[in-house]
Amino acid sequence: MSASSEILDRFVNGEYEHGFVTDIESDTLPPGLNDSVVRTISARKQEPEWMLDWRLRAYHHWLGMSQPDWAHLRQPQIDFDSISYYSAPKRKKDGPKSLDEVDPQILDTYEKLGIPLEEQKALAGVAVDAVFDSVSVATTFRRQLTEAGVIFCSMSEAIREYPDLIQQYLGSVVPHTDNFFASLNSAVFSDGTFVYIPAGVRCPMELSTYFRINEARTGQFERTLIVAAPGSQVSYLEGCTAPMRDENQLHAAVVELIAMEDASIKYSTVQNWYPGDARGRGGIYNFVTKRGDCRGDRSHISWTQVETGSAITWKYPSCILRGNDSVGEFHSVAVTRGQQQADTGTKMIHMGRNTRSTIVSKGISAGEAQNTYRGLVRMTPGAENARNHTRCDSLLIGDRCGAHTFPYMESRNPTARIEHEATTSRIGEDQLFYCRQRGLSEEDAVSLLVNGFCKEVFNELPMEFAVEAQKLLNVTLEGAVG
Amino acid sequence: MLNIENLHASVDNKPILNGIDLQIRAGEVHAIMGPNGSGKSTLAHVLAGREGYTVTDGQVLFEGEDLLGLETEERAHRGVFLAMQYPVELPGVNNAAFLKASLNSVRTARGEAALDAPAFLKLARDRIALVGMQDRFLKRNVNAGFSGGEKKRNEILQMALLEPKLAILDETDSGLDIDALRIVADGVNALRNPGRAIIIVTHYQRLLDYIQPDRVHVLANGRIACSGDGTLAQELEEKGYGWLNEESAA
C-alpha cells in the first residue's frame, strides 16, 4: 500500500517536462474583445474585405451566445475581456524566407521539445509548418509539395493567395455560428494551416504542424482547413506542447476536414498542453471543434488522438458521413492525471447508404482526474445499412480518479446497426507485484500495462508518431500507479 | 544459499509466521507442505517481497545478503523467482514482449548485455521446447484468456527463461489435471541443476510423485512442525494433517 501511494504521489506531482518560456519580443494586442480588435487582427494580416466581414459576422453572433455548460467539467467562468487576442513574434521585414532567418531562440525552443526542424527536414521527411504563437515562422518542403500540386501553407497566406478555395470551403463544415468556441475562433482566429490535395494525388509526405502557446494570456485561436479533392490521400500530424504558466490559457481551435469522392484524410494528434500545477492552477483550457465531412461517396476520414495535456479538454472530433459508402473512424487515448479534466469523444453522423464508423476510445485517469467519454452516433433516415461499432475502455490508476461514459445513440433507420461496448479496469497491486517479481521496475510495469491498454490506438498512428506518443505517455505516467 | 532464521511475519497485524528456521543449499529441492492457513503461501510471498506482508522478527540471508532489505524487483534480479498460485492476467501486454523485458531487466541488473529481438526469440524457442510448450504462447497476451493449466505452464516457461537461482513454486499443482501436472513436473525436473535451489509449496503429495524432493517440511501454525525426506510426504498423504496438530498440541 505505502509504496503504491508513494508512486501515485510522485506521478501526481511530476513536473511538466516542457515547461519553459522563450524570451522573444512579441507584438501583442491589449486584452479585450470588440469590433475594433477584430478589425485590427484582420488588418494586421492584410486580409481582404470578405474575410473581415466573415469575422465580424462571427463576432456579432458570438456576442449573443453563452459558454456551454453541459460537459462533465468543473470550469471557471472565463473572462474573455482579460485575454489578448493577437500575438505575433516581431519580424524584421516581411518574415523569414528560410530557417536561417528564423529567430535562433525559436528554433532552440523546438530543440528543447525534441522537434528539431533541421533534423526533421533531413531525417523524417516531414514538412513542418511550425506555428509559434500565432504566426507561422517556418515552412519547409514547400517545393516538393508544390511539384505534387499540394498546397500546404499558413491560413493567412491561403487567404491572400487562394481566396477562391478559402471562400468556398472555410466554414463549410464548422459554420461561424456552430458553437460558442467555434464562433469565437471564427471572429479572432490568428493563423493556422491550409492544405489542399488535388484530385488523384497521394500527398508525397506526411504533413505536420507543431503548435505551441508561448505568450502569457494570449488566447490561441488556430484554424485548420484540409481539403482532399476526389481520389486524393493525405495524412496530417498535429502535435503540441506548451510552456509552464500561472494563468489559464484559452485554446479554442477549429479544424475542418473535407473529403471528396474516394478521398482519404488521416488526421493524427498528439496533444500535450500544460496541464497546470499539482493544484490545477495555470493549465491550458482546450476547447476545440474538429469536424470532418465525408462529402463524397467512398470517402474516408480517420481521427486519431493521444491527449495527455491541458487542465480542461473539451473536444469531439467528428465525422459527417454524407457520401454513400463513406467511412469514419475515431481512435483516442486520453490521459488525465492530477486535477486534469477531459470531456472528449466523437460524433458520427451517418447520412449516406452503407456508411460505416468505428470508435475506439481509451481513457486513462490517475490522481484526482476526471475522464469522460461522450459520443454521439446518429443514423439519419437515409443511412440505409449503416454500421457503427463503438468501444470505450477506461483504465483507472488509484482510487481518487473517475471515468465516465456517456454514449448517445439515435437511429432513424431500421436497417442501421449500432454496437457499443464498454469496459472499466484498474491497474492492480497484483499486476504490479507480478511484473516486479519478474524484475521490472514499477514504472516499467506501468508503462507496459498502459501501452498494452493503448496499443490498438497507437497502431493507428504513423510510425514515428507512435513512438513519440509512447514516449510521451511514459513521461506523463512516470511513477504513475497504485 | 538460503538461510531463514526465526522468521516472523504478519498480515494486517495478524501473525502468520511464528519463527521459521530453514536452510536450503544450492542444488536442493525442498517441499513445504501443510494444511490451509499454516503459512505456506505467506512464506513464499515474504521471500518474494510482496507488499502487505510485514516481517516482525528474524532474518533471511540469500547468498549471504539480507534478502528482506531488497525491493521486490531487486530480489528478482538476484535470482529469486516466484511461480504464482494465481498468475495475473496482463491484458494487451504481449507475452513475448513481457518475457523479453523481464529477461533483459534481470540480465542488465547482472551486468549482462540485453538481448535483441532475434537473440531473444532463439532463446525463447529453445526454452519453450525444454518445457514442452508451443511457440503460440509467445504471441498471446500475458495469461489473458489462458486456461489454468496454460497459466501454470507459462510460469514454468518464465522460470526456464530467467534461470533463477532460487525458484519458489507456490501451489503450482493446484487446479491442474493429471496431464498438465505431468507437463509442469517435467518442466521443473528439466530445470533442476546443481546451481539452483527449488522450493515447492504444496498442499498435496501428488506433485511429489513426479518431483522427488530432497527434504520435506511440514508447516503448522506458522512453524515447521517436522522435517524429513520424501517418505514424510507419503506419510502425510496417508494420515492427513490432523495428527500434526495433535502432536504439536501434546
Image (tube, rainbow, N blue to C red):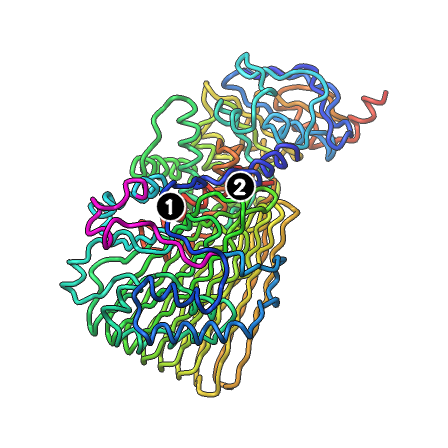
In the displayed structure image, the side of residue A289 where residue B176 appears, left or right: right
| Residue B180 pos. (x, y %) | 52, 43
Tell whether label 1 touches label 2 (CB within 8 Å).
Answer: no
Q: CA distance from mark 2 to mark 1?
A: 16 Å
Q: Which residue is mark 2?
A: B152
Q: Nearer the viewer, residue A222 or B240?
A: A222
| Residue A94 sits inside the magenta stretch | yes
Q: Which residue is mark 1?
A: B135
Tell me the chain of label 2: B
Question: Residue type at mark 1?
Answer: Asp
Q: Nearer the viewer, residue A438 or A202?
A: A202
In the displayed structure image, the side of residue A15 where residue B202 appears, left or right: right
Q: Which picture quadrant has residue B237?
A: top right
Q: In the rendered image of this protein, does residue B22 appear above or below residue A416? A: above
* Magenta-tinted stretch: A84-106
In the displayed structure image, the side of residue A422 where residue B244 appears, left or right: right
Mark 2 vs mark 1: which is more N-terminal? 1
| Dot 1: element | loop
Structural crowding at the residue carrying mark 1, measured as other residues with C-alpha within 10 Å and reported as few (<14), some (14–19) or many (≥20): some
- Farthest left residue in view: A147
Quadrant, the N terminus of chain A: top right
Question: Residue type at mark 2?
Answer: Lys
